Image (cartoon, rainbow, N blue to C red):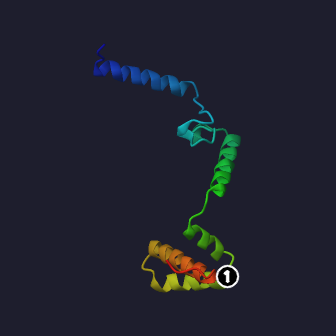
Amino acid sequence: MKITKSQLKKIIKEELSKALNEGYRSGPTDPVDGGSGFSSDPRQRTPEEERAHKAQVAADRAKEEKGPKAQALAWLGTQPEEEEQAADYARMNAEDHKSYQQLYAKKALELYHAFHGMPAT
C-alpha cells in the first residue's frame, strides 16, 4: 500500500492532535521521561508532580557515582583554606569565567590528590 505525502502529513497531524488532546502522561519506564514517571513536558505537570519530579531527579543524581573532579570539588567545599587557594589561583590565571571554572576545578583536583597522598594526574 502506498501513501502519498499529503496522506502521511494528515495521519501525523491526526495522531499528534490525538496525543495532545489525551493529556499524555508517560509511564514509569517511558524512555522520554528519563524513568522518573512524570511527563517529560513540565507544562503538563501539576505543581505537586513538578516538585516530586525535581525531588526524584535530585535523589537519582545523588546516587550517581561522582567522577574525580566532582569528588575534588565536593571535598574542596569542606576545606576553607584550600578553597581560597584554588580561588586565588584561578583568579590570577583566568582570562574569562569559563577558564576560571576550569582552572578552579584543575586546582581542586590537584589539592585533593595532594591532601590524600595520591599521584597527580
Q: Nearer the viewer, residue 11 or 81?
A: 81
Horizontal arrangement in the rendering, residue 93 relative to residue 51 (left or right): left
- Residue to which mark 1 is pinned: 80
Horizontal arrangement in the rendering, residue 46 relative to residue 68 (left or right): right
Q: Quadrant of the N terminus?
A: top left
121 relative to 33, above or below: below
Q: Amino acid at mark 1?
A: Pro
Label count reads: 1
Could you tell me residue 27's position as x and y percent? 61, 33
Could you tell me residue 36's position as x and y percent? 63, 42
Could you tell me residue 7's position as x and y percent? 33, 18
Identified at 55% across, 85% down, the residue is 88
Could you tell me residue 79's position as x and y percent? 67, 80
Q: In which image quadrant can residue 5 be found?
A: top left
Identified at 60% across, 32% down, the residue is 25
Q: In which image quadrant can residue 72 be found?
A: bottom right
55 relative to 5, above or below: below
Q: In which image quadrant can residue 46 be found?
A: top right
